[in-house]
Amino acid sequence: MKQRSSGVLMHMSSIPSDYGIGTMGKESYKFVDFLKKSGQSYWQLLPLCPPDENGSSYSSYSTFAGNICFIDFDLLEEDGYLKKSDYDSINWGIDESNVDFDKVNSNRINVLKIAYRNWIKTNRKRIADFVKENKWADDYAMFMTLFLFNDRKCWWDWEDKYKLRDEKALSEFKKEHEDDVNFWLFTQIVFSDQWNLLKKYANKQGVGFIGDIPIYVAGNSSDVWTNPDDFCLDKDMKPIKVAGCPPDAFAKDGQLWGNPIYNWKKMKKENYTWWCDRLRAYRNMYDVVRIDHFRGFDSYYSIDASEETAKNGEWVKGPGIELFKVIKDELGEIDIIAEDLGYITDSVRELIETTGFPGMKILEQAFDPREESDFMPHNYNSNVVVYVGTHDNDTALGWFNSVDLETQELCKEYLNIGLFEGVNWGLIRGSMASVAKLSVTQMQDFLGLGSEARMNVPGTVGINWKWRMKKGAATDKLAEKIYHMTKMYGRI
């Protein structure tokens, strides 16, 4: 990771598009150009893997696969696999500032099936080559085909022969549904092609990608279906223990995430092969990897799967530094950001210090009139990444307008924010001016947007992940303003 640099956090879904959701097409290339003009070194994304039905990529059908909604139709049209008439008259949603996931998800699959029928005529050999290079791909394609064949039931509710992965049954199913399996492989080949072209372009412009990897995977995923022994499951293949967070000031019942807990003893016996494969894939895809909920490697909060809240969980010792020694031996050095937010103990701090990975600071959480916070910039060391706010926080203006008067006054006084400058720019300046190695700002804050542009409210469903930037919002004037501040604080 570059010393003294800065970047912008904006998910691919938020890129402007005529087709309901951001893609890896021309608008993403324009955004890379905007980042270069702004003097930014990084574009940070949320996970690019397939999201759940609520749009959350932190609960995905596969940690290795790419979100097919980010495949660009115009690029497929240029390659001769689609016609404009196949997709330009479809209703993708009426609000250009929000994703309509219902319309986007169903309509995009229909259009991609048209492209697949044209693509498969001349590219059948690519399927075998792709599967050979990406060992997860065939399992993912089989999982998605079986998932839809079983009316979207969780895999542990499938017939035993499919649930328990009977080789003969799976082989017969694959022969009977070869076209469906190949369709899902096609989506991953095209996703990979389009992503690699975009990354190559961005890197050439001096812009690197920061990818996001959730510590846990979804129970209803090809990852768990393919590797059930790596997780704490019962004889019916349902989770015994699930992940979450204990009660705190933000959630009186805690957070019950529901992800199955890893069988760390089994993983250790296999020299953490699954984790090495996972990080190898992310290292090849991104320039820097942010690991969400890093503290779970030191100790994790385990909740009985029968519980309805996270109140009655317990802390259990995780793999610790041993896992990262193995990863380093197997993969060499990887640029990793450790998301060390929440309940942090001395042993968590020791783990992060031993790995040498930079931790995170959130400026919006710094200004507590009752006590001094570790998130105050004068308490930073250089080996941290500072965010005004992350995807789990409100925008800068939304946060400021929601806190009490004392917090507002402390923020304004500490950062010396004037009326002319504006709160969002004052917070951005505080982040940029700090000693942190890397400063990352949500695009919403550069645009001066309020709570209507918030990406996620933890513990809620159905209202998140929807915000989209309007076309033309990333102007040359804004780029010039960002560049000036970035240069002033030595982050070019």
Image: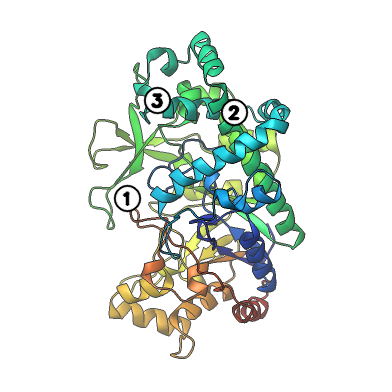
Q: Residues within 10 Å of mark 2 (few under 14, many from 20)?
A: many
Residue 452 at x, y = what percent? 37, 68
| Residue hosting label 2 | 182
- Give the answer, above or below, for where 486 lies relative to 152: below
- At x 35%, y 34%, the residue is 242
For residue 461, the mark is 1
The answer to whether 135 appears left or right of 212 in the picture is right
Q: Amino acid at mark 2?
A: Asn
Quick one: 242 or 86, which is closer to the camera?
Answer: 86
Q: CA distance from mark 3 to mark 1?
A: 22 Å
Q: Nearer the viewer, residue 175 or 467?
A: 175
Residue 57 visible in the picture: no
Where residue 228 appears, as percent x and y from the top left, is 45, 22
**Which amino acid, by three-letter code, is at mark 3?**
Trp
Badge 3 marks a residue whose secondary structure is helix
Cα distance between the residues tagged 3 and 2: 20 Å
Q: Nearer the viewer, mark 2 or mark 1?
A: 2
Query: Can residue 453 be spotted in the picture?
Result: yes
Going from N to C along the chain, the mark reached first, 2 or 1, is 2
Q: Which residue occupies 54% across, 78% down?
A: 429
Numbered disc 2: secondary structure: helix
- Is the residue 81 above or below the residue 97 in the image? above
Tag shown at residue 30: none
Across and down, in percent, residue 125 comes to: 73, 27
Instruction: Give the position of the C terminus as an image quadrant.
Output: bottom right
Res. 155 mark: 3
Left or right: where 320 falls relative to 204: left
Q: Are marks 3 and 2 in contact (CB under 8 Å)?
A: no
